[in-house]
Image (cartoon, rainbow, N blue to C red):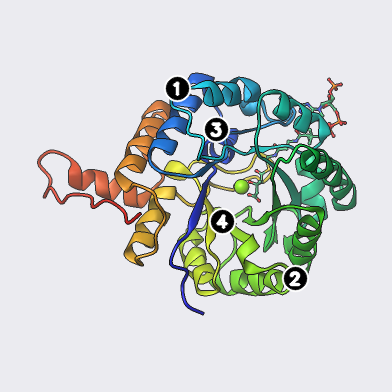
Amino acid sequence: MAFPTRVKLVEVGPRDGLQNESQIVPAAIKVELIERLADAGLSVIEATSFVSPRWVPQMGDNAEVLRAVLASPRYRPQVSYPVLTPNLKGFDAAIEAGAQEVAIFGAASETFSQKNINCGIAESLKRFAAVVDAASALDIPVRGYVSCVVACPYEGDVDPQRAAWVARRLLDMGCYEVSLGDTIGAGTPTAIKRMIEACAAVVPIERLAGHYHDTYGMAIANIYASLEMGMAVFDSSIAGLGGCPYAAGASGNVATEDVVYLLRGLAIETGVDLDGLLAAGQFVSRYLGRESGSKAARALLARQAPGSAGVRVERSVS
Ligand code: HMG
Ligand code: MG
């Protein structure tokens, strides 16, 4: 199958990235990061999650962050700022804070579902159906996630049919898109392709997204494999921030800068400005006091540094 000519990127750094930082990042820094990501041309930026602050204290400022983003003079109406809502309680709080898009997050692994959201898959689907019903009454779009689509930190390899089954349930419920999470980044292109094949047999590929963590350094290869299958939506995280608090050892999502660099090389449009992304990545990396997790960002910034060969970063196609 031919590569797509355009790819949509869903930036998950402010949520998936910062939920896993040991330090709690102040709301003002999160808001500044989200605004810089929007300035760089990202059209979907997952802003926060309305989960229990006892489970994930890093997201305890969810309403404050979302309200500040929506009220900011830098707010861009063409950008979507979805938030995670695992149940009606989270959904109600998100709506109260002004959410205009939400996401529900299930799993293909029973044990991961229990550890992550404190209920099994069947019960989670009931909770999600209630969220989707409430959202549809308010015309709020809902995105769905399936975690552990190729492997689970507790159960090992996951049968692709189980991922496909949950993905289909989420679509039937009313999700406009289902993001397939390789939560622990264990997948390789062969496993990812097998998993996409199973999912695409029951959910149109246009409604599927790849959400690949980079624990084993496979995420870029997995995106390339997914592009070959015709997938055109990918989740990524600025500076490679991230992980999952309920998947020990899981490292960050694939870095947004690396994905944009790859796609630019393949002449696939993203609408994202790589220079703007580099600036946003530098901002958050400096705040966290460490080097960016993006190899492309590190290389490009080194080339821009005074005294270097001085090769300019081209603007990405948009
Ligand atoms: P629970 O304890 O089963 O909920 O938590 P409960 O209904 O039994 O209520 C217990 C207490 O939690 C009550 O408070 C509720 O009010 C409160 P108390 O009366 O004891 O004071 N509560 C809430 N508080 C705030 N927001 C809520 C909420 N719901 C109940 N929405 C729950 C269930 C899902 C809330 C909990 O298990 C939780 O917060 N889990 C954290 C899940 C999470 O954030 N995981 C990380 C994100 S998923 C991920 O990273 C994977 C992904 O990136 C894809 C991939 O990589 O695979 C998406
Ligand atoms: Mg994730």
The answer to which of marks 1 and 4 sits earlier in the sequence is 1
Going 45% across and 62% down the picture, which residue do you hit? Answer: 6
Task: Give yes or no for contact between labels 1 and 4 (Cβ–Cβ under 8 Å).
Answer: no
Point out the frontmost of discs 2 and 4: 2
From the top left corner, tell me how far across and down residue 176 is, in percent: 69, 54
Mark 2–mark 3 contact, CB under 8 Å?
no
Whether the residue carrying mark 1 lies under 8 Å from ligand 1 is answered with no
Q: Which residue is mark 2?
A: 202
Residue under circle 3?
A: 21
Which label was assigned to residue 212?
Answer: 4
Q: Residue at x 71, y 73 (%)?
A: 198
The percent coordinates of residue 181 (x first, y second) are 64, 55
Q: Are marks 1 and 3 in contact (CB under 8 Å)?
A: no
Residues at discs 2 and 1 in contact (Cβ within 8 Å): no
Q: Which quarter of the picture shows residue 178?
A: bottom right
Residue bearing mark 1? 73
Marks 1 and 3: which is nearer the front?
Answer: 1
The image quadrant of residue 89 is top right
Tag in front: 2 or 1:
1
Between tags 2 and 3, which lies in front?
2
The type of residue carrying mark 3 is Glu
Quarter placement of the C terminus: bottom left
- Please state the horizontal and vertical placement of residue 138, each as a whole percent of the image: 76, 37
Distance, label 1 to label 4, CA atoms, is 33 Å
| Picture quarter with ligand 1 | top right
The one of 5 and 250 positioned closer to us in this rendering: 5
Secondary structure of the residue carrying numbered label 4: strand
Could you tell me the amino acid type at mark 1?
A: Pro
Mark 4 Cα-neighbour bin, 10 Å: few <14, some 14–19, many ≥20: many
Q: CA distance from mark 2 to mark 3?
A: 36 Å
